[in-house]
Image (cartoon, helix red, strand yellow):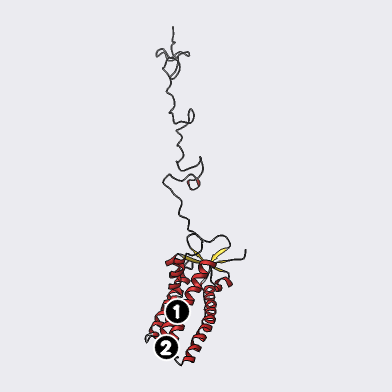
Amino acid sequence: MTGSMDPAGQGPGPHVDDPGPGQAGAGPAAPPPSSWSQAGAGPAAPPPSSWSQAGVPPSVGVPPSSWSPPPVEAGPAAGIVYAGFVVRLVAYIIDGILLGIVGGILAAFVVGASFTTGSVGFGALGIVAVIDLILSAAYFIYTWTRMRASPGDRLLGLMVLNAADGASLTTNQATLRWLLLAGPGALANLGTYGVGVGALISLLVLIWYVYLAWSTATDSRRQGFHDKYVGSVVVKATLM
């Protein structure tokens, strides 16, 4: 007999040698899911695609394919900073003094010559104003493009550069910068010598310079309107 009566006599019970479920004769065992890491373990969730490896936070892993680094703003190299408003103002005053000395010498010749002819008047003074205008333009445009700084700037360790790449200003950039920065002052000087609305011109020029000073002092890169318009920047070397 293949079975035996149980102690209660209620029928044959299973033989001790009968195969149980999952053993021989019960059919092949179902394989574990393919995503399981090993037999008996639950399915292992794959790490997010932005991770570099398991257990590494997403913030330091590989960025998503659609991510791109933010643009890097061009700026001065190490040891170079954007020059502040006050030091630039002092440099501009130094340039004005130098121009005033040279212009005064030339004006003395013109006025002296007019005295000898007995024709001193608005004509001679107008000539002096034109000379000052030309002298100012030549002074700043030449030094900005050839020396990368005016004499006043160089005395205080400043440089006037192209904001995009740090190169010297082109002639067009320097000319536009002079027209916006020094040109109005020279124009006001010309107006006081022969134009009846000289006082009004001087007032407008003063308002313009106040605006340039404000725009320079409040900008993060110390670029006034004149600098932003032509793409220039003034920098200063620092002690390392």
The kind of residue on which mark 2 rests is Phe
Residue located 40% across and 86% down the image: 194
The kind of residue on which mark 1 rests is Ala
Q: Position of residue 124 (x, y in %)?
A: 45, 87
Q: Earlier in the sequence, mark 1 or mark 2?
A: 2
In the displayed structure, would residue 116 be above or below residue 147? Answer: below
Q: Quadrant where the C terminus lies? A: bottom right
Q: Which mark is residue 186?
A: 1
- The answer, for residue 234, to whether it is visible in the render is no
Q: Position of residue 156 (x, y in %)?
A: 58, 72
Q: Quadrant where the N terminus lies? A: top left
10 Å crowding of disc 2: few (<14), some (14-19), many (20+): few
* Residue at the extreme left of the image, as rendered: 197
Q: Position of residue 176 (x, y in %)?
A: 43, 69
- CB-based contact (under 8 Å), mark 1 and mark 2: no
Q: Which mark is residue 122?
A: 2
Task: Give whichever of 170, 11 is nearer the camera.
Answer: 170
Asked which quadrant contains residue 154, the reply is bottom right
Task: Give whichever of 126, 159 is nearer the camera.
Answer: 126
Q: Secondary structure at mark 1?
A: helix
10 Å crowding of disc 1: few (<14), some (14-19), many (20+): many
Distance from disc 1 to disc 2, alpha carbons, whole Å, reads 17 Å
Residue located 51% across and 83% down the image: 106
- The answer, for residue 112, to whether it is visible in the render is yes
